[in-house]
Amino acid sequence: MAATIEVDGLADLIAEHASWLAVERGLRPNTLAAYRRDLAIYATYLRERKVRDAGDVDERTVDDFVAWLRAARDEEGQPRWSASSIARTLVAVRSFHRFCVDEGLSTDDPAQDVRAPKVPAGIPKALTEAEVESLIDAVIGDTPAITRDRAILETLYAAGLRISELVGLDRPDLDLDDGVVRVFGKGGKERVVPIGRAARAALTEYLTLGRPQLVRTASSSHDAVFLNVRGGRLTRQGCWGIVRAAAKRVGLEDRISPHVLRHSCATHLLDHGADLRVVQEVLGHVSLSTTQVYTKVTAERLRTVYEASHPRARAR
């Protein structure tokens, strides 16, 4: 018989689950925070329906929870949660119930057979090569902050890094002689990514002329590659602000998202003949199917060029 777990005490159990995710699975703080948020919604749903312990949760309860998420609307009548958000929440719920089973707190996993809503395979919005050049060229000057900002844009595009990966770089992670950077991605997974001449030159200029002037105090003499104006490690928000400011200068603010240079890197590699598995390694995708979405980008671009160029593409 399953052990009784009071729903009003789920906060402690969710905290134990988060510790397990951090220690056993090595998830990063941002991912852990997302799990906590999703499970807080789940716990609230259970309380409102008078479900008092995890042993009373069955497959129908979880199925109804997913249906409730899909039906929820905001004040304007729009869906409160997207299909991708619901799918992510269900991942957290499944992980939680598996944890309960593994820890002997429950005998059954009520979430294992519940289907998530189908998430449309979105096509990443990549910039054109000319737009990437204009974005980088918009960062003009030789001040410490300018050399840093130029190195950030070049590195994001050259290595296809996530912003969190970029701000997490330490100086030992860079080997500019060999033109590679060591990256710690999701779950702490390590990969080594090549970078080209433009990024190497920008990083060399920043590390030689810019970074030393941003190191203000002894406490800021850590190994972080990218520093803020106070000498501390640049945050994700600070890095995103730098990208957005450059985009605004050249009228690309409506085309920019935190991943846009990563998407552009992958798309342009494929456009120029890179093997899909090479792109998978560059981006650090565990599954090749995740990388395959970029093939749709190049197919869409091919169709656009074809229809604009072929004399009978639109003939009736």
Image (tube, helix red, strand yellow):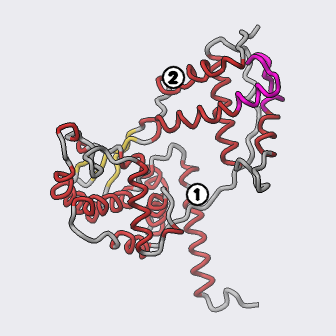
Which residue is the site of mark 2? 19
Question: As shown in the figure, which amino acid type bears the numbered disc 1?
Answer: Val
Rendered location of residue 216, percent (x, y): 19, 46
Q: Which residues are magenta?
A: 42-62
Left or right of residue 239, residue 228 in this image: left
Rendered location of residue 308, percent (x, y): 60, 85
Q: Is residue 47 a member of the stretch shown in magenta?
A: yes
Q: Secondary structure at mark 2?
A: helix
Please name which of the two marks, 2 or 1, marks the residue nearer to the observer. 2
Left or right of residue 125, residue 61 in this image: right
Question: As shown in the figure, which amino acid type bears the numbered disc 2?
Answer: Ser
Quadrant of image for the C terminus: bottom right
| Sequence-first disc among 2 and 1 | 2
How many numbered marks are there?
A: 2
Q: Are marks 2 and 1 in contact (CB under 8 Å)?
A: no
Rendered location of residue 192, percent (x, y): 34, 46
Left or right of residue 303, residue 314 in this image: right
The local crowd at label 2, few if under 14, some if 14 to 19, many if 20 or more residues have their Cα within 10 Å, is some
Picture layout, residue 100 above or below residue 136: above
